[in-house]
Amino acid sequence: MRLTAKEKIAYGLGAVGKDMVYMLSASYVLYYFQDILGVSAIAMGLILMAARVFDAFNDPIMGVVVAKTKTKWGKFRPWLMIGTVTNAIILIVMFSAPPSLDGGGLIAYAAVTYILWGITYTMMDIPYWSMIPAFTESGKEREGLTTLARSAAGVGSAIVTILTVMSVAALGNAFSAKESDLLTKNFASSDGLNYTAYVIEVDGDQNPTGNVTEFAGDNVQVSTTITGARRVFGDWNDVIYVNSSNADVTLTINDQEIEASNVEFVKGDYEGEGDNQTFVDTDPLVSFYVDSDTYAELSAEPSIRAGILMESNLEVERVGFKYFSMVVGILFVVFITITCLFIKEKSSVDIKTASVGQMFKALIQNDQAMTIVITIVLVNSATYITSNLLIYFFKYDLAGSNWQGNYTLFNTFAGGIQILAMMIMFPILRRFFNTLKIFYICIGSAIGGYIILLVMALAGLKSVFPFFVPGFFIMAAVGILNVVVTIFLANTVDYGHLKNNRRDESVIFSMQTFVVKLASGISALVASICLAVFNIKENSDVAATYSNIIAKIDDIRNGVVETISSNSVIGLRLVMTLTPIVVLVVAVLIFKSRYILTDKKLGEIITELKSREA
């Protein structure tokens, strides 16, 4: 009996939920702990890699446990449900690090929660993919369901990729706790303060154009009212730095309410270094980043009168990730529950149990499975390296105060292309080419896309739209490859059955779970090394000083728009483009030299297996 539409939808929803969770962890756990909470990049890289080493032992064991399970609900669904609930809980805990933790305590928290997340994800992921043979009846139906599930997984990944940054900002702003010890302070020219005000023009991508108008002395009258917590601003006796990214801003200039992409206020500076550093009181400096029309209007004025209300939002991203992980975790549980309710095991999949030692031996004996495992690791590592560094590329290279919007726009396009590739492009290509040829076409497309991306990045393009071109070639390839390699992996089950006289669905697909996580660990380690070596991290302590704001404005005047050094920019561009190219070339060379399961070969294997059963 063929699968019903209801069963297909239920299974697909499970894939959406589980890949939402996976993508949130794979793409943002490094950013969360390193860029937001301050854990060193190298420490995070080692944690993520150590978790993958642990998975090398944990995942095959879980495959054995699933194989031995016998309940009235079946072999797979109990573990699918248990793993989902526990993984959702750990996900929320992982992205809810206590703000009081620092140093070694924060590193320990990251290590424990991430390893537990990997364990619980394995508990769910292995039975999810291993159960396909239990409710499908033919190779064609199995391939169709695998394609559907991979497409649905791509939807889940795309949803998180598209929504995370903007959702985190929105949720963080909505739920950032306003401390009970709020202080309000007014800094006004009427109190004898001598403001310096800068009006800075930005283009459509919110990058400074180089046009800056300065107002000082009697030509500027400003009143700035700031509300913030005592633990952030102390008693207003140190350097105070507030901008549009950490505060809600209401701005009035020359009696008109003005929209500004960014407003910066700074008062105070430091002299000396290290233990000899001392605070120096300064008059306030304020800068307004405005569009071309507003800039033309304001720069023509002889003087400026401004009223600024700034209400600080504390730790917006930290709080935002906490609540966004809750949303994703809840959806994950709901979707997998639907899967478990509507999917029933229609046949008994006879999976003979084996010891862990026998299991590793069986995997080593299946040379085709090992070839696909290595290929999956390399292909996923290439794409994950880029996805891990992409947020830093938009934040610190393309930059601009609208980097979050541009990042979301690009991810919306890339995610959409990935989904269309799996759901539409793959079936079309399948009509004209076999899966082997499709694999090579996709690898070529991805490499070509990375070459285009490298050229554009090194050219210093600052608009997001040209990057849609390499994004198309790379993400279309990634989407189709996700389907193709899963089909390849399923093919190795029949090959292993013929060669080793046993069907190891759970073990083979436990390797898929492991290698995908291994790829994320390798890519995170590479990204971490890149971040550490090239010092790619915003230094808010430096940025918050009066002299450095002046230096930044001077750079803007001179056409230099960098939030990290030029060497860091070049290093980031090279690592996120050249490294994936090299890895993909190695992947295709290994695959071409070792993979033998052509359509003809698979036909011969299936014929031989049927003759054995006769």
Image (tube, helix red, strand yellow):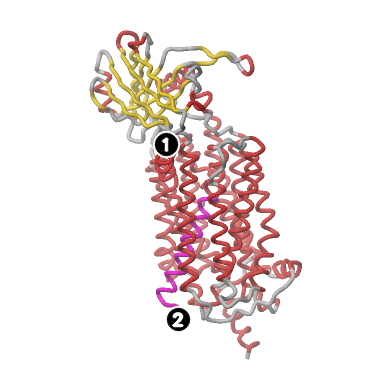
Secondary structure category for the residue under label 2: loop
Seen at 41% across and 55% down, the residue is: 417
Seen at 49% across and 77% down, the residue is: 140
Q: How many marks?
A: 2
> Tag 2: residue type?
Arg
Seen at 51% across and 61% down, the residue is: 482
> Tag 1: residue type?
Leu
Q: Which mark is residue 2?
A: 2
Magenta-drawn stretch contains 553: no
Residue 17: x %, y % from top left:
47, 60
Magenta-drawn stretch contains 24: yes
Seen at 66% across and 62% down, the residue is: 59
Q: Which mark is residue 390?
A: none
Crowdedness of circle 1 by 10 Å Cα count: few (<14), some, many (20+)? some
Question: Magenta region, mostly helix, strand or loop?
Answer: helix
Residue at the disc numbered 1: 461
In the image, the segment drawn in magenta is 2-26
Q: Earlier in the sequence, mark 1 or mark 2?
A: 2
Residue closest to the far bottom: 614
Indicate the quadrant containing the C terminus: top left, top right, bottom left or bottom right.
bottom right
